[in-house]
């Protein structure tokens, strides 16, 4: 057997493996304004459903009501949905966390 044709996944003992550069995807940061007028910076995972994003925001800002009573809207009052969340995050859109009454008013 010819040794020059063998492939090994283990480097020779006198050589150290080269570090492979890791690519990290930076999640854009969005500004979210709460119904109290406070603005928080949020890194939103685009793979999550909007309901999970709203729930996490409500927990972090200690919202008094149940997260199901809140929704996200952008500056043009467009409702943030699972379908357009990724675009809103990518565009770094300023978002508002609104109550269900406001959501019903704008819908």
Image (spheres, rainbow, N blue to C red):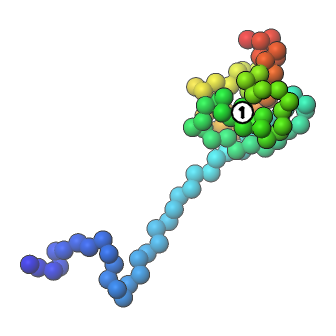
Mark 1 residue element: helix
Residue 52 as seen in the image, left or right of residue 58: left
Query: Which part of the image, by quadrant, shows the N terminus?
Result: bottom left
Relative horizontal placement of residue 33, taking residue 45 as reference (left or right): right
Q: Is residue 97 visible?
A: yes
Return the residue nearer the eye: 99 or 14.
99
Is there any visible trace of residue 74 in the rendered image? no
In the foreground, 26 or 97: 97
Q: Residue at x 77, y 12 (%)?
A: 104
Residue drawn 30% across the image and 71% down it: 9
Q: Residue at x 66, y 33 (%)?
A: 52
Relative side of 70 to 7, left or right: right
x and y percentages locating residue 44 in the rendered image: 67, 41
Q: Residue furthest left?
A: 1
Can you say which quadrant of the picture contains the C terminus? top right
Q: Position of residue 41 (x, y in %)?
A: 78, 44
> Residue 91, located in which quarter of the rendered image?
top right
The 10 Å Cα crowd at callout 1, few under 14, some 14 to 19, many 20 or more, is: some
Quarter of the image where one finds residue 46: top right
Look at 11% across and 79% down and name the residue there.
Answer: 2
In the image, residue 91 sits, relative to residue 5, either above or below, namely above
Q: Position of residue 50 (x, y in %)?
A: 65, 29
Image-quadrant location for residue 45: top right
Residue of label 1 = 55
What number of labels is visible?
1
Above or below — where is 20 with respect to 37? below
Residue lying at the far bottom of the rendered structure: 14
């Amino acid at each position: 057997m010819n040794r020059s044709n063998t492939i090994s996944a283990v480097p020779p003992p006198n050589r150290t493996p080269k570090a492979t550069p890791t690519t990290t995807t930076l999640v854009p940061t969005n500004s979210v304004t709460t119904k109290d007028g406070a603005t928080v910076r949020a890194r939103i995972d685009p793979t999550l459903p909007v309901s999970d994003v709203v729930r996490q925001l409500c927990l972090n800002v200690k919202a008094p009501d149940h997260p199901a009573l809140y929704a996200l809207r952008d500056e043009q009052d467009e409702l943030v949905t699972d379908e357009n969340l990724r675009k809103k995050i990518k565009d770094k859109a300023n978002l508002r966390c609104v109550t269900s009454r406001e959501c019903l008013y704008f819908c």
